[in-house]
Amino acid sequence: MKIERLLHPQEEVLIFLRRDKWVLLKMALLYGVLLFGPLAIVAIAWWFFPQWLDRQTAEPSISVFIILGSSLYYLFVWVFLYRAWLDYYLDVWFVTNERVVSIEQKGLFSRTIAEQRLFRIQDVHAEVHGVIATVLDFGNVTIQTAAAEVVFEFKEVPKPHLVARNIIKLVEWDKRRRNVRE
């Protein structure tokens, strides 16, 4: 989706966010284990029990079920990998000089696009949980309006404290520009 199509005239993107690269690396490691794990198990079984494995694969009906089962397994792993990558790549948040926009992919065929004007924002805070998130400096940024519910949550974004501080500055600037009283 082209972001330019979502912008109003005279509106410019000031902050553009996507999940941290660590999330992509973590996903790649998980699916790498899922893709190469069964091959490693078969190699270890063949190394330690070659006679048993030869007897199991010598029967044609068993071989067909092994091939069918492994094909289905790899098909599902690739589909879930593709879905996870789409979720990573298509979840985008950006802040313009007028509003905050959240585009979140939920599944393969569902997308949510939400926006909120800057002057309506009441609270912005950042959270970092865990050792890896602290070391690599990524976490969640939560934005709330006067309503009790959370309007936006930017999940696993890099430098969440800096992002929250910059959004607060933009909100204050927009309120001064519009002469909005808190």
Image (cartoon, rainbow, N blue to C red):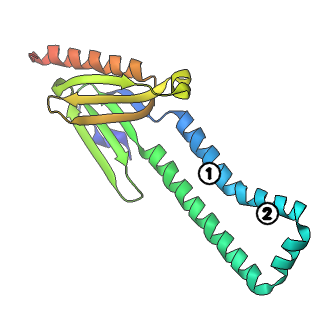
Quadrant in which the C terminus is drawn: top left
**Residue 8 visible in the displayed image:** no
Quadrant in the rendering for residue 94 = top left
Q: As displayed, is residue 181 above or below residue 11?
A: above
Residue shown at the point (14%, 28%) measured from the top left? 146
Residue shown at the point (34%, 16%) measured from the top left? 165
Q: Amino acid at mark 2?
A: Val
Q: Residues within 10 Å of mark 1 (few under 14, many from 20)?
A: some
**Residue 118 visible in the displayed image:** yes
Q: Which mark is residue 42?
A: 2
How many tags in the picture? 2
Residue wearing tag 1: 31
Q: Amino acid at mark 1?
A: Tyr
Q: Is residue 60 left or right of residue 28?
A: right
Residue 32 screen position, x and y as percent: 66, 50
Residue shown at the point (46%, 36%) measured from the top left? 19
Quadrant in the rendering for residue 116 = top left
**Is disc 1 placed on a helix, strand or loop?**
helix
Determine the CA span between mark 2 and mark 1: 18 Å
In primary-sequence order, the first of circles 2 and 1 is 1
Residue 142 screen position, x and y as percent: 31, 29
Compare residues 103 and 177 and report the one nearer the observer: 103
Q: As displayed, is residue 148 above or below residue 105?
A: above
